[in-house]
């Protein structure tokens, strides 16, 4: 085995570990924040939704700059280490300052730092394996990410049952340390930073040192359509799990955190095989089909939540979160890479789309909180499901298939054949 191959193998193993441990770090306290504020600090649903929306909106401002930073820097591992440290410190300070504005500020810091992980992990993965193996590598990333989420949620659920909801803060600290060690274990020399930003070896002689202008982000019509669909996906999806957690916690506050962990484990168990499916079959079956399927799951899920308040039923329906989020998480960077191939703007494009995603997620919790206060939980779930239905219609009617019939992306094919119109001009 050559030294290069050995480095690639070491890099792939370290990326696996980083995805596993970052699963509990990248979102900070995630849905546990709502449980903690509801049961331990006696906040109402509207306050919880508002503070989560404020934090998310602060994070939105960092999304596109984060993607641009990942495109520009060759210190991607150290940027992620710094982000993991910030997320953890901001979250661990929360119990010391549990009033509205300190919580909003600390979670805003956590969200702002956390936005670096999706583009940076995708960029490092692309820089290590190259574009031909990227879909499989992303499927593998998401599989380890979901395994990490399931493991952390299972530990949190058992520990919270024994010691109370605050145990999630200690778990976050432990996972942060492990994630930092994993990131530093990725050999720097295994990362091709030009490939990592979307300047692929299939067209080095044309584009490797000449990234496209940032105007490509506004002139690529399929990218704008995809951004709209992603916004609607997260406007629907983001509030469903926190809303479910609140509903379960109101039934039994002492089991709220443990039941939330059961919901997360249930979803993550399904997400892992969904991510593996994307990695194995998306290049053959088509990338748009997987994204459309992720959207269509949400109206079904929202409707089923209204059928019963039985705890087992609600946790069982949460399995559908694993289908939708598992498909979306794996296919998202693949579609962005398709559309930005050979532009050198892969990561800033991810930042732009994640900005749209975060906007939808931020508005989702506020929308759900207001609907719950006015007409109850069932109406909120149905409203969120209807939003996803609109997104599915837009995807089906307006978003083109990004994977070419010959196995490359549409942009790759068009770049190699100049007479054909470019994606950015569509």
Image (tube, rainbow, N blue to C red):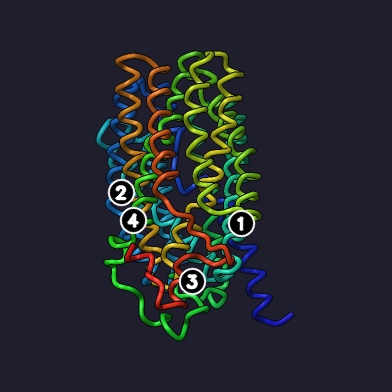
Q: Is tag 1's residue or tag 2's residue first in the polypeptide sequence?
A: 1
Q: Is tag 1's residue or tag 3's residue first in the polypeptide sequence?
A: 1
Q: Position of residue 192 (x, y in %)?
A: 51, 76
Question: Considering only vertical position in the picture, is 314 above or below 408?
Answer: above
Badge 3 element = helix
Farthest residue in the front direction? 419
**Number of the label disc, if any, that sits on residue 404:** none
**Number of the label disc, if any, that sits on residue 352:** 4
Q: Is tag 4's residue or tag 3's residue first in the polypeptide sequence?
A: 4
Q: Nearer the viewer, mark 4 or mark 3?
A: 3
Q: Position of residue 393 (x, y in %)?
A: 41, 39
Relative depth, front residue between 318 and 299: 299
Q: Which of marks 4 and 2 is in front?
A: 4
- The residue where tag 2 is placed is 60
Q: Is tag 4's residue or tag 2's residue first in the polypeptide sequence?
A: 2
Total label count? 4
Badge 1 element = helix
| Neighbours of disc 4 within 10 Å: few (<14), some (14-19), many (20+) | many
- The residue where tag 3 is placed is 413
Mark-to-mark CA distance, 1 and 4: 27 Å
Q: Nearer the viewer, mark 2 or mark 3?
A: 3
- The residue where tag 1 is placed is 17
Q: Position of residue 364 (x, y in %)?
A: 35, 33
Badge 2 element = helix
Q: Which of marks 1 and 3 is in front?
A: 3
């Amino acid at each position: 085995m050559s030294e290069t191959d050995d480095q690639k193998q070491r890099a792939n193993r370290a990326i696996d570990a980083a995805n596993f441990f970052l699963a509990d770090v990248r979102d900070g306290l995630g849905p546990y924040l709502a449980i903690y504020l509801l049961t331990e600090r006696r906040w109402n649903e509207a306050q919880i939704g508002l503070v989560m929306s404020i934090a998310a909106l602060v994070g939105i401002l960092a999304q596109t700059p984060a993607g641009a930073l990942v495109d520009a820097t060759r210190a991607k591992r150290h940027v992620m280490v710094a982000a993991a440290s910030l997320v953890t410190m901001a979250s661990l300070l929360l119990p010391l300052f549990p009033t509205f504005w300190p919580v909003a500020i600390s979670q805003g810091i956590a969200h702002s730092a956390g936005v670096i992980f999706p583009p940076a992990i995708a960029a490092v993965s692309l820089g290590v394996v190259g574009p031909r193996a990227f879909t499989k590598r992303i499927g593998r990333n998401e599989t380890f990410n979901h395994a990490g989420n399931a493991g952390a949620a299972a530990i949190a659920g058992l520990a919270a049952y024994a010691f109370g909801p605050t145990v999630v803060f200690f778990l976050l600290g432990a996972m942060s340390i492990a994630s930092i060690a994993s990131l530093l274990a990725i050999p720097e020399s295994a990362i091709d930073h030009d490939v990592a930003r979307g300047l692929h070896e299939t067209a080095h002689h044309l584009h490797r040192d000449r990234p496209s202008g940032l105007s490509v982000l506004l002139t690529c019509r399929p990218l704008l359509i995809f951004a709209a669909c992603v916004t609607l996906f997260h406007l629907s999806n983001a509030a469903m799990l926190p809303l479910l957690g609140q509903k379960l916690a109101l039934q039994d506050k002492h089991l709220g955190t443990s039941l939330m962990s059961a919901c997360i484990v249930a979803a993550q168990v399904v997400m892992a095989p969904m991510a593996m499916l994307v990695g194995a079959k998306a290049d053959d079956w088509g990338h748009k089909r997987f994204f459309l399927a992720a959207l269509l799951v949400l109206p079904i899920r929202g409707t089923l939540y209204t059928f019963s308040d039985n705890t087992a039923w609600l946790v069982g329906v949460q399995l559908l979160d694993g289908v939708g989020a598992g498909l979306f998480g794996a296919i998202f960077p693949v579609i962005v890479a398709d559309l930005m191939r050979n532009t050198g703007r892969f990561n800033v494009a991810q930042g732009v789309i994640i900005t749209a995603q975060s906007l939808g997620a931020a508005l989702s919790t506020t929308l759900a909180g207001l609907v719950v206060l006015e007409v109850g939980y069932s109406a909120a779930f149905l409203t969120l499901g209807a939003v996803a239905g609109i997104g599915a219609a837009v995807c089906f009617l307006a978003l083109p298939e990004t994977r070419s019939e010959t196995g490359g992306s549409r942009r790759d094919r068009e770049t190699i054949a100049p007479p054909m119109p470019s994606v950015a001009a569509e």
